[in-house]
Amino acid sequence: MLKVYNMHFKLSIKKGDTVKVLAGDSRGQQGKVLMINVSGNTAIVEGINLVSKHSKPNSKNTQGGIVKKEASVHISNLMVLDSKGIATRVGRTLDSKTNNLVRYSKKSGEVIK
């Protein structure tokens, strides 16, 4: 019998990061990460991968109708942008001042906030 382990890896993308979409219908677009789903390795990015959702009339939306909403994108299709707006891979290193792990851009070498 094949055993499947639910392993969670350290992700290079965090909530609040600005990312660029590498593949899919939204390819080349940029946006801010709103939410991360660690178990599914997906993220919801502001203004990316919009889908139409049909909603019934309710107290919040008395009219009802079709609402545009962001759908999730797999993390492998996203790349973090550094402060200069360049898509880069992310590394981790010890900060000499605080002795904490910090993320840095592998292209420019600067720390990603």
Image: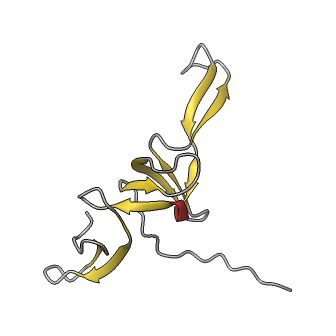
Vertical position of residue 66 compared to residue 25: above or below: above
Examine the image and state in which quarter residue 40 appears. Answer: bottom right
Side (left or right) of 79 relative to 72: left
Side (left or right) of 86 relative to 15: left
Of residues 26 and 11, the one nearer the viewer is: 26
Q: Position of residue 109 (x, y in %)?
A: 24, 75
Q: How is the image coloured?
A: secondary structure
Name the residue located 66 percent from the left edge and 25 percent from the top edge: 55
Q: Position of residue 83 (x, y in %)?
A: 24, 58
Image quarter in which the N terminus is found: bottom right
Q: Residue furthest top?
A: 63
Of residues 110 and 108, the one nearer the viewer is: 108
Of residues 49 and 38, the one nearer the viewer is: 49
Side (left or right) of 62 relative to 108: right
Vertical position of residue 66 compared to residue 47: above or below: above
Q: Residue furthest front?
A: 28
Image quarter in which the C terminus is found: bottom left
Q: Position of residue 107 (x, y in %)?
A: 30, 72
Name the residue located 47 percent from the left edge and 52 percent from the top edge: 35
Of residues 102 and 85, the one nearer the viewer is: 85
Q: Residue furthest left?
A: 97
Q: Residue furthest right?
A: 1
Name the residue located 36 percent from the left edge and 56 percent from the top edge: 17
Q: Position of residue 38 (x, y in %)?
A: 54, 64
Vertical position of residue 72 compared to residue 8: above or below: above
